[in-house]
Image (cartoon, grey):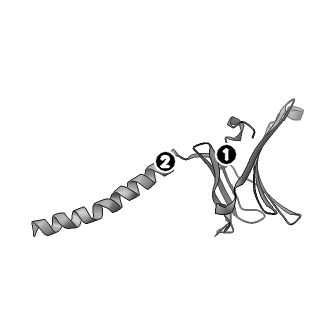
Amino acid sequence: MTKSKFSNALWFFPFFLVASCSASQLDKAEIIFKCHADQPKSIDVVISKMDNSFKLAQFNIENSKFANAALISDVSKSSYHRSLVTEHSMTFTHGDSEVIVSDYYSEELNMITKETSVTIQKNGKKEYWLCDESGFSQLGSIEDF
C-alpha cells in the first residue's frame, strides 16, 4: 500500500514541475502597459515585455479575446516631445489592422493632463478608448525602435 501511494506521488510530480516552470516564466514578463475602459465598449489590454520583445499579452473587447493577437509580429515604438507635452506610443500591426497604445502627459495652460489610451485602426475605421484610473504605462522607459 505504501509503495502504491509513493508511485502515485511520483506520477504527479512532473505535472507540478511543469506548472511551476510555467509560472516562473510568467513571473519574468514585465507588464509595461495596462488599460481598461467601458466606453464605447468594454476593452482590456495588457502589453508585456520579456527578453526585449513585446507582446500583446491580453486583448479583450466586450469580453471576447482578440483572435489574432498571437499573429501580430510587427511592433514599433515612438515618442513625441515638445515643451510641456510628452507622448509615447506603441503600435502592433497585422495586415491592415493596427492596435496603438499610448500615454500622454501635458502641463499646458497650467493644467496637468495624464491619459492612457488605445486606438484600433482597421480598413480606414478608427475606434478610440480612454483608459480608466486603473490603467498605467511604462512606455516612456522604452527606447524608440
Q: Is residue 40 at all visible to an observer of this figure? A: yes
Q: Who is closer to the viewer here, 110 or 77? A: 77
Give the image location of residue 106, x and y in percent.
Answer: 82, 36
Task: Tell me the SS state at disc 1.
Answer: strand
Q: Amino acid at mark 1?
A: Phe
Task: Please state which of residues 37 and 91 is positioned toward the viewer in this rendering.
Answer: 91
Q: Position of residue 16 (x, y in %)?
A: 34, 59
The N terminus is located in which quarter? bottom left
Q: What residue lies at 76% left-to-right and 62% top-to-bottom? A: 39
The residue shown at (48%, 50%) is 25
Q: Position of residue 143 (x, y in %)?
A: 72, 36
Q: Amino acid at mark 2?
A: Asp
The secondary element bearing badge 2 is classed as helix
User: Which residue carries the number 1 mark?
Assistant: 136
Q: Which is more N-terminal, label 1 or label 2?
A: 2
Q: Position of residue 142 (x, y in %)?
A: 69, 37
- Pick the front one: 118 or 108: 118
Residue 8, by quadrant, is bottom left
At x 64%, y 52%, the residue is 55
Q: Residue at x 67, y 62 (%)?
A: 71
Structural crowding at the residue carrying mark 1, measured as other residues with C-alpha within 10 Å and reported as few (<14), some (14–19) or many (≥20): many
Whether residue 115 appears in this view of the structure is no
Q: Are the residues flagged by discs 2 and 1 in contact, CB closer than 8 Å?
A: no
Residue that label 2 marks: 27
Left or right, residue 126 beside residue 2 = right
Q: Residue most toward the left? A: 1
